[in-house]
Image (tube, rainbow, N blue to C red):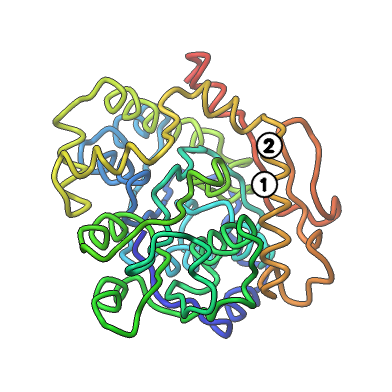
Amino acid sequence: MITKLITTLGLAATLALPLSISQAAAEEKTDFKVCWSIYVGWMPWGYLEDSGIMDKWAEKYGIDVEIVQINDYVESINQYTAGEYDGCSMTNMDALSIPAGGGVDTTALIVGDYSNGNDAIILKDKSDLAEIEGQNVNLVELSVSHYLLARALESVDLSERDVTVVNTSDADMIAAYATDDVTAVVTWNPLVSEILTQSNANKVFDSAGIPGEIIDIMMVNTETLADNPAFGKALAGAWYEVMELMASGDEEALTAMAEASGTDLAGYKSQLDSTEMFYAPADAVAFTESGDLPKTMQFVAEFLFDKGILGEGAPSPEFVGVSFPDGSVYGDEANVKLRFDTTYMTMAADGAL
């Protein structure tokens, strides 16, 4: 993911956006816009646009869908939250903290993958996670990297009090690692792969240690989706057509995604190896309907609350309600703002699109 520094002030400003923004986006319409940023599991969105596959599915449903790449991950979420886009690729954690925490009712339309090694902790000249104690750790503060660090520290009976977090932009991470002062970093691919080419770099923990917790999703405005089911059908139909190409090893499609992400085919395949892609819609449905997802979202909510970024004035981790396909809710049932809904993924699995 390409992102920028996340400051508490900037995040608070996002969370303070008026609720009328999301309401303004909800109406029956024919033109839609979704945005995405560079990350291995989101490269299909760019290919959808460039290949014409999105246009084909949009035409089938009598609508127009524009897919826009934004080179700043957090800014893409901010623009979605502000109502500039009808959908945006983001993680489950960022969806809860920014749009949902800010009052924008958001639905997980397509659960695309989870990080299964793409996010990692790297130590310089040390090979054991426990040796991170007492070190400065460079990462994008309040991001999934911060979450990964917290979960990893728990596994060796440490906490964030045992390290010093240094807020560092992902754009500066590789250069920072090259300096003598930086001895520990937490980041994501393709940055992880590049840093690990250094002889003194040792990966001591990665997201494979917390499988299914860092989830990559196409989130959409709930009211817009409710008023425009054709929007959901077109996105799901186009996405799963590309998933079939990827699953079959289509080199034209995979090479295009690799080049767009700044690597070659081998490099992109290597990143896919540490990504649990849900190529089959039935697999995405099964994951979303599993009993593990509510537990994961509780972990995430507790982390966000601990960091003070679950929502302005949030009194507890249960401030924002999160609903699941079985109708259960974690958090406040009167304030459900994040919804995991398998409707459109199930349609794709059943051949009903």
Say which mark, if any, is on residue 292.
2
**Distance of mark 2 from mark 1, alpha carbons?**
6 Å
Task: Identify the residue at horizontal 32%, vertical 38% (top origin).
Answer: 272
In the rendered image, which quarter is residue 162 located in? bottom right
Q: Which residue is mark 1?
A: 296
Query: In this rendering, does residue 23 appear at all?
Result: no
Q: Is residue 29 left or right of residue 58?
A: right
Dot 2: element = helix
The quarter of the displayed image where residue 170 is located = bottom left
Q: Amino acid at mark 2?
A: Asp
Residue 223, horizontal then vertical, whole percent: 64, 48
Quadrant housing the N terminus: bottom left
Residue 91 location in percent, x, y?
51, 53
Relative to the observer, which residue lies in front, 99 or 229? 99
Specify the amino acid type for callout 1: Thr
Q: Residue at x 48, y 49 (%)?
A: 207
Q: Is residue 333 above or below residue 141?
A: above
Q: Nearer the viewer, residue 207 or 115?
A: 207
**Label 2 with label 1: CB-CB less than 8 Å:** yes
Q: 230 or 115: nearer the eye?
A: 115
Provide residue 208's location: percent of width, then percent of height: 48, 43
Residue 287 in sight here: yes
312 lies above or below 337 = below
